[in-house]
Image (tube, rainbow, N blue to C red):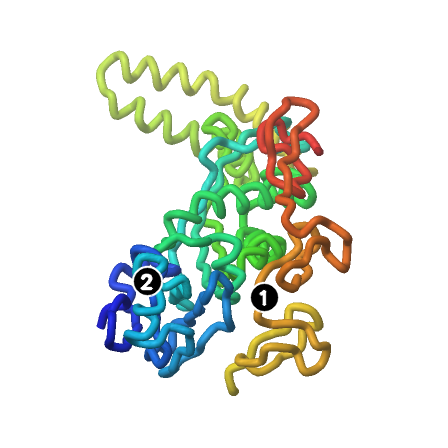
Amino acid sequence: MGVDNVILLEVLEWFDETGRELLHRLPEHGSGEIKFGAQLTVRESQAAVLFYKGRAGDAFGPGRHTLKTGNIPLITKILSAPWGLISPLRAEVYFVNLKVFPNLKWGTRDPVAFRDSELGLVRLRAHGVFNIRVVQPVLFINTLAGTMGKYTTEQIEEYLRRVIVSRLNDYLGETLDTLFDLPGKFDELATALKERLVKDFSRFGLALDELYITSITPPEDVQSAIDDSSRLRVIKDMDKFVRMKAGMAMEKASEAGGEAGAGLGMGMGMMMPAMFAGSQAGGQSTATAGPVKNQCTDCGNMIPADARFCPLCGHQQVVLMQCTNCAKNLTPGTRFCPRCGHPADEKPSVIVCVHCTSENLPEAKFCNNCGRKL
């Protein structure tokens, strides 16, 4: 049924046909006159939030719910005559998709600077995939979606990419000494990077379900130098390697046939003693080389999934807003954070690098453009 009936009650439900919507609002064109007794049906993979008179109520879990507003069928229409038969008791329902949104891609749009202890300043490109899900519906609506009728993964994917790349750059600058240490460390890097991103995602009511690094690649000339270094490490006996290469070259020369092949083979034979002597010297030097539960974000204990407050520490679980400085849960109308004193409505500012004047995300420790410490 529709959401603007004059007499009949509404039946509200929503299905995500695209698989990309994090949020969907009913009515789709704005607010409506949802009446007292309207029926709200929420699926297992959803949560619903009723906004009435501009304020958000608690999130509704799976099941059928009866909504209570001040809009009485027909009577409200008559009483709304001074406002052009439009009830001032506006209401809307936001459906939030709680499923995991997989295979979101992240990567460096422009190479980031990394100071390698052996190679110097190197510009790296990194790519991977990540999965997200909404864990705080009210906080997600208040911080990201706002009054939008729809909110999809495409609308937030670009920002999350920038956050991931910035935190990756910080982690590489703090822990990685040289690119030669990268092979075999992708899983370790992904795990550590995921831990660093928890706070960035939780500010918007999101959780980073998984993060994978598929590649971290330097420029082609640096890749060639790394390949050469890897080949030298594989070759354990340089003397035997040089002899084998010389023998293969002589074999190919003899296959050429004619006087040219014979002359080339003779020349290779005359060069072999000097090559063997050099390889022996080089070889010597080389040889020396249960029930569904959630985790309380404050004390870390497992609590029932439908709990509004932690029974152990009293921490509020249904989050309306968070401090942009320390991520403390704030009550509606709070002007300053009770933990750090930071203004509640102040947005975090970008950090400008003093060396190259490039803008970086808040709390970044290394510049994405020049690689120097901020």
Between tags 2 and 1, which lies in front?
2
Q: State which quadrant residue 139 falls in.
A: bottom right
Which is nearer the eye, 226 or 239?
226
The first of marks 2 and 1 along the sequence is: 2
Label 1 crowd bin: few (<14), some (14–19), many (20+), radius 10 Å: many
What residue is at 29 percent from the left and 23 percent from the top? 254
Residue 246 lies in what quarter of the image? Answer: top left
- Residue 43 position within the rendered picture, expressed as x and y whole percent measured from the top left: 35, 77
Outermost residue toward the bottom? 290
Residue 112 vertical placement versus 127 (above, below): above
Give the x, y percent position of residue 288.
70, 38
Q: Which residue is mark 2?
A: 81
Drawn side of residue 28 relative to residue 186, left or right: left
- The residue to which callout 1 is attached is 319
Q: Quadrant of residue 75?
A: bottom left
Q: Residue at x 30, y 16 (%)?
A: 262
